[in-house]
Amino acid sequence: MKVTEKEVSYVADLANLELSAEERNRMVRDLNSILGYVESLNELDTSDVAAMAQVSDRYGVDQSKKGSERFAYASRDDVHEGLRKSFPREVALANAPDTDGTFFEVPKVIER
Amino acid sequence: MNLTGLTIDSARSAVAERKTTATALAENFFAKIASDDPKIGAYLMLSKERALAKAADIDRLAEKGEPLPPLAGVPVGIKDVLVTKGVRSTAGSKILGNYVPPYTGTAVARLEAAGAVVLGKLNCDEFAMGSSNENSAFHPVHNPRDLTRVPGGSSGGSAAAVAADMAVATLGTDTGGSIRQPASFCGVVGLKPTYGRVSRYGLIAFASSLDHIGPLTKTVQDTAIMLRTIAGRDPMDATSADVPVPDYAAEIDRPIQGLKVGIAKEYFGEGLESETRSAVEAAIQRLASLGCEIVDVSLPHTKYAIPAYYLVATAEASSNLARFDGVRYGFRAKGAGSLSEMYRRSREQGFGSEVKRRIMLGTYALSAGYYDAYYLKAQRVRTLLTRDFEEAFTKVDAIVGPTCPTPAFKLGEKVDDPLAMYLADIYTVTANLAGIPGISIPVGANKDGLPIGMQIFGKHFAEAMILRVAYAYEKAA
């Protein structure tokens, strides 16, 4: 077993998930089964292989450029020309579970 | 005239030549959905009022004899992970059960601008996570070819609606095979374009570097027409590519003699069911008889595709799905005493089990101490898998193989075994990691009448070529 119940609880905390005891047990089983399977990746020596985060690395990118310059071709026009217009407040709030009409409302964050 | 059996061109011509009206077309489709969808479950909601208003606009143009747009009056369905202004968009999840988007995604907007009539939103696995459509928070979809079987996933509703004549064409999304696999299971055509070919603006994100939008249709020509309509640079998606969009349908009939078609032995190994193998091999023989040169190629890292995919996809998903916190939109759990308790309970009650499993796996793969071993390792293997294709495409124009190792499986067969379910994507995930285009076309059926699909891959932006190969096969078959 690679992943223990304690680790599952820790990861659930990181992910803001509150798992039931039954879900936790099932998660220990499933994560171990999947992680056991992905173990096969270690058969490959990748020490000299670059990581690929996105497909556009493989086309359209000027390899001679560095850092964010490489992806300048993908800059958004609307950001170039200043921020685009926001939704009116009532549209932005229309799907909110709780609002006072001006702000999103949430349970108290700081106790005093 | 059987209005619900029409293709895009025949539907548009029928409206343009006044043999029918866009309104009659839409009404016929709604009647078909009312009678047949209760046993299939492809639609999550219908946008009847909006569809009939749009159809009436088209009919007014036709009456005046004005030129009609390319998809005038064509009834389409949209996978529910694509947002539609004013029409509930749930991503198949309870956490977005009441979400009514304030904007429409680019691909849908382009279809509507071209005259298409949106009938409604199609069922799918929750957040497009699944290979059977059984992870929908609302109800499963039944395969129209055999109601005891799954339609595939995650775009199960999109494939089933086309197969059952409940839409002329649909939009789906494909993160690891979610267009091609259901197209194969339901016996329709499904295309995953090149990454960047179609804007993702308005797609509720699962894994941003792997998500693609594409069409599902009855014919290859219809797929070509749909792709031309939705493709092209969009300032709202920084990853949409500034590459010209050809008239795919106009080029589709060009001969395929002399094209080199690659066969990778890794796609014909263990696990491939014998009837599927025979059907695909027969289809390859057909391509040879049409003048293609069949060439053996190797994609040596194929067996590492599923492990690499499930690490990259879940890592991106854990990040993308962090936005569902019950604050600005979506479900909020009642009775939480603190903000963090509200977050946790809303996500616990709002997400289904497969979504939680993937968030957990992705969070684990990104967490301190495991990042290099899992996420970074998977990204390096992604490079190797992409190089496999790049090397093969120095020798061949296209690569063909089965879309799936088996035809549609039974509902319930794999729900308790996530790993078995993931393996249904074994021939499809690599194209998402590499970002190359792939199309699945029907190439026959097994002895029980279940459809079998063949997949054709091309280089980045080689959609015109794979559509030509698919069309030549379809015409000859």
Image (cartoon, rainbow, N blue to C red):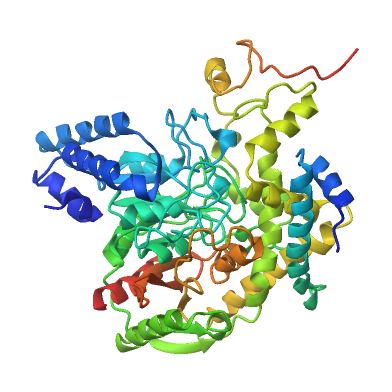
Q: Could you tell me if residue A85 is visible in this image?
A: yes
Quarter of the image for residue B67 reads: top left
Q: Is residue A2 left or right of residue B140?
A: right
Q: How many marks?
A: 0
Quadrant placement of the C terminus of chain B: bottom left
Name the residue nearer the viewer: B65 or B275: B275
**Residue depicted at x 30% and y 60%:** B218
Q: Nearer the viewer, residue B169 or A51?
A: B169
Q: Quadrant of residue B333?
A: top right
Tell me where residue B8 appears, x and y as whole percent.
25, 53
Give the vertical position of B56 relative to B82 (above or below).
above
- Residue placed most toward the observer, B290 or A62: B290
In the image, residue B201 sits, relative to residue B243, either above or below, namely above
Q: Residue at 71% across / 47% down in the picture? A: B318
Q: Is residue B156 found left or right of B392 in the rendered image?
A: left
One can see residue B247 in this view: no
Residue occupying the point 34% across, 62% down: B145
Image position of B472 (left or right of B424): left
Q: Residue B71 in the image: x percent, y percent?
A: 26, 47
Q: Tell whether B350 sits left or right of B243.
A: right
Location of residue B345 in the rendering, given as x and y in whole percent from the top left corner: 72, 32
Measuring from the top left, give residue B444's x and y in whole percent.
33, 75
Q: Quadrant of residue B338?
A: top right
